Image: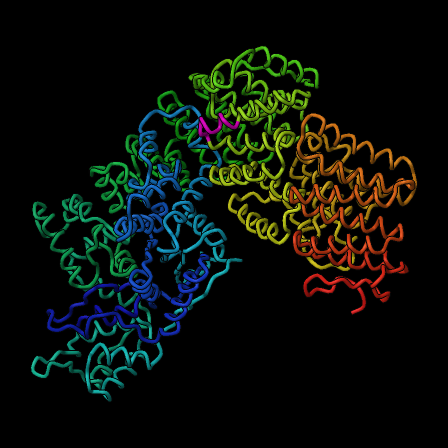
Amino acid sequence: MLDSDADLSTVTDTYRDVDFDFNNNEESLGTSGPTLFGRDQEVSLLLQEYRRVLQTKHARTVVIHGESGSGKTVLADTLRDAVCNSSQGHFVAGKFFQNQGEEQEPYSAIMAAFSDLCDLKMQSDDFDEHQRIKIQRALGSEGPMLNRAITNLSPFIEDHYLKLRTTSQSPEEEIDVWNESSFVRFKVACKTFLTAMASERHPVVLFIDDIQWMDAGSQDIIAMFLQDKTLSNVLFILAYRDEEAASVVGLLEQKLYVDISVKNLNLSAVQGLLCYALDSEAFDALTELGRIVFKRTLGHPYYIIQFMETIQSERLLLFDDYTSSWTFDVDTIQLEITLSEDLADLLIRKAQRSSPEIRTILKAASLLGYRFYESVLLHAAPTLMSGSAAASENAKSIVLSSLSAAVGDGYIEKVAEGYQFIHDKVQAAFRSLIGAEEEDMLHLILGRTLLTLPNEKLNIYGAAVQLNAALSFCFNKEQRLELVRINLEASKYCMERSAFQSVASFLRKGLSQLTEEETWSEQYFDLTYEMKESLAKVELILGNFDACKAITKDLLLYGKSTKMMLPSLLVDVEVRLAGFEMNETIAAANRVLRLLGINLPRKIGPLRVLWKVLRMRRIIGRKTDEDILGLPMMNDHSMSVAVRILLHLSLACFLQHNDDHGVYAALVAAELTMRCGLSGYSANALAIYGASEQVLGNHARGYRFGQLALKMVNRIKFKESEAATVYTVTSWISHLHEPLRDIIDPISRVVNVAYESGDSIFMIMNLSAIFNLSLMMGTNLQKLESLMSDQYEQTQIIGNDTLRLWLQPSFQYVINLGTACVDFRALTTLTGDIMDEATYVQQVKDANQPHVFIAMAYVIKAHLACLGGVYDVAESALRDVAPIGQLISISYGGIFWYSTASLTYFERFRMSQERHYLKEARKYKRLIAKRQAVGCPNCSEILVFLAAKEMALKKRSTDAELADAFDAAIDAFKNVRQYQYEGLANEHAGLVFARRGQRGAAEQYYERALYIYQNDWGSIAKFELLQARAARSLAGLTPPEGTEASGFTPLIGDVIICGDV
């Protein structure tokens, strides 16, 4: 008996915990316990990466690759003991299987690992109710979505979310399942799950095997994991075969990972393995046997196993009971054994030698997949065995005995889920024995058998895979229509698991079974419409916009009523909005609204907007906030869709720089809310109404409805509109009522909400707002750059490169100021190293991006130029802002714009004495003062600074008056931690006193400015620029008493600020 359980299996990637019994179980080959030969370096690398996860807490990735059977799986599994026993971590694994059908089981490897992780978490010694609740809260409303894919997740889902899934959905929830952000939501939910399960105390090792066979959705999820820098306490191990490396190139390119290439064993390792396995003292003979094995197998672990099986079966390796040792003759082995270099040939010959019953059963099993259930084969037995000599009534017993014999022969193994092939090459060997005609018949038998089994949804999925593979059979009309319905049901099964690629595939195959005459015939109209409607929605989710539009065109052509077409009409609008076809979005939205009886005026100007605001006031009347929040939910589905369409139209109009139309559409949505009840999108409509009131000067009313919109979001808990609502309130309302620093946190929180809901547009908008507000507030540039880098990469997950254009100017601003520079003028480009300015502007315009973002980019450029004293560049950028900056003027960016403009024009007046510059500076200063007059808390500090600047221009101002004015500005900025402006006020004070010949005062202000720039704000560029500027401005001035005249050389810590070094 030759048993390789603990010996040969340890160097292969498939023979885990398997007993290979040859010669009637005479003796076990070697001892128990895994031993790897020739893999010391690889094991060390794995352990090293896991230790780094424990030390740094950051997620890391290891990629293991090699030939099939080279030991990749067993190598990864060596880490299990270190993870589970030594560090109380969780080691979970999932494997993709080579499915013979076209459809892969969606997310099979990832979800299998996640299910195991749920079990391990529940079995942890320290797991308690507190931990369970913590995980429940982390998963939140996304738990039910994952519960459809992760079998053991229900204990980690809050009860009220489970109950919600069993009750009827609101119109918005029903629609949301199918919007274009669904897959992003599912991906983010997977990340949320992993984040909740992995902790410093219980790190997770996630091993995904055979990624060369992953489905498209799994590839997207794994790619998200690899590029997400926020994940912690996780080690990812991915394994793939070198023979199919091309299939993983797209996943791994430009990713950081440790590469482990698993090669064949060398001669020394093969000899060591045989000495260990045979436990023999015949060293010379074993050494020679090792040479033969190495020569015939080239050290390939799986080949070694097969070679040893062969000499065992040929009785060239025997166990001597008397001596309790293995006996063999190397000369005989060398003469009589010829091993083909092609492993596939060897396995095929071995499969051919198996009994007819085993061949019949395993050929059918090979079409079911790498892993299969015996119940399918038992139900199919009478048909499968009909050609056998055995009577059909004994077919089931023959199946069971054949499976048992196949286990004994080393073809398959018993697992918890049924059986699985010992190696996918064994599966392939039996499949190769099937002829083309026989294969189609087997697919047909298996497909029909699956339809008769319980667990209806899963088996319908399997039946669809099998029957679609048997299409070469000439099905009659009744069979074709049955297959259409089976594909529809299989698509629903996949949809529940967010496996959108598979959904689309099943729907396409089902529709292909309908003839052209049948497709829209009265008899099959409902079936066709349902499948095409579902396919249009999933094509939108997958980003196949052209396919979606083509299908939607058919649906709108054949639809019998507005009610029937309503979902397709919504898709028609959303696919154009998702593709940034703004003119088409506007046209499509207006078509839908007209069908719903809502006719918007073609020409909308400020007066119409004012009229609509006044109408809203009359409708609202004396209603309190609680009255509005207590409105019932809309029960008219068409009106709910209308509100959603109006908000889409509003966004498209804003992005097209058609602000009046955008506001008007949102106000109509707000009016529908007040008349028909609340919907998921009502909060954003009321927020835009509040912003409209604020623009009209009704600041208290505007702020009231902004806060009301935020309360409504929290009450309705509809994520898809939360990001848009928060952006509207914080950007257009709150900045006039709350300190800017206080509104950064709410925006930061809602970025995650947008990310989780897949709202790419408002995720980027809110990120842009965070960055710009942080710039205005003078946040430390090093911290800001780190935040921006992480978030900028995070946006890659949402897959919209166009939208990320919005972030580039503020990103470049931070990079420019945070790094050393020689020529500050060279840093005043909009985008710098990311792309040149002309290209940036053109790309934004080509992508139909809103003018407001180009305008904001010019404001950022002007501010950067103003900081560097390059006032001509700042003036040029400000001129570019003026004609397109209307929306900025009413947002938080208005203060940024006005303060930059006022500072720039005061300096231009000082240098040129041209009074039109003074006029411009005072104009922008008055605009800031106007905001302060209505209670804006973000104006007083900059106004004090501008007053000091204006005072410095007057010759009659005394030094004491100027010192008081600048000190007041410096203290004001210091109190609100606006380091950028605090440093700038000190710098300008130093320049003023240097021009007045007051060297001592100038030096003091310069020292403080330099300290702030270097330590608080972290701007190396400004620090270096001021060093040079300070030296020039002080040159020739008489130093104060007690100071050397050789130069300005103050010290801050150990840093020489300026002077002769």
Q: Which residue sits at x=43%, y=51%?
A: 222
Left or right of 1001, for residue 618: left
Residue 233 x %, y %: 41, 56
Left or right of 142, for residue 25: left
Q: How are the residues colored?
A: rainbow
Q: Which residue sits at x=19%, y=56%?
A: 414
Furthest residue in direction front, as rendered: 1041
Q: Is residue 277 visible?
A: yes
Name the quadrant of the N terminus. bottom left
> Is residue 708 rendered magenta in the image?
no
Q: Quadrant of residue 958?
A: top right
Q: Which residue sits at x=71%, y=29%?
A: 931
Left or right of 485, for residue 185: right
Residue 327 x %, y %: 15, 82
Above/below status of 843 relative to 327: above
Q: Main secondary structure of the magenta part?
A: helix
> Is residue 711 rendered magenta in the image?
yes
Above/below status of 341 relative to 743: below
Exactly how many numbered labels are in the figure? 0
Furthest residue in direction bottom, as rendered: 284
Q: Is residue 560 visible?
A: no
The span shown in magenta is 710-718
Above/below status of 41 relative to 620: below
Residue 436 x %, y %: 30, 51
Q: Quadrant of residue 701?
A: top right
Name the quadrant of the C terminus. bottom right
Q: Which residue sits at x=55%, y=22%?
A: 686
Residue 502 x %, y %: 39, 41
Above/below status of 334 relative to 1003: below
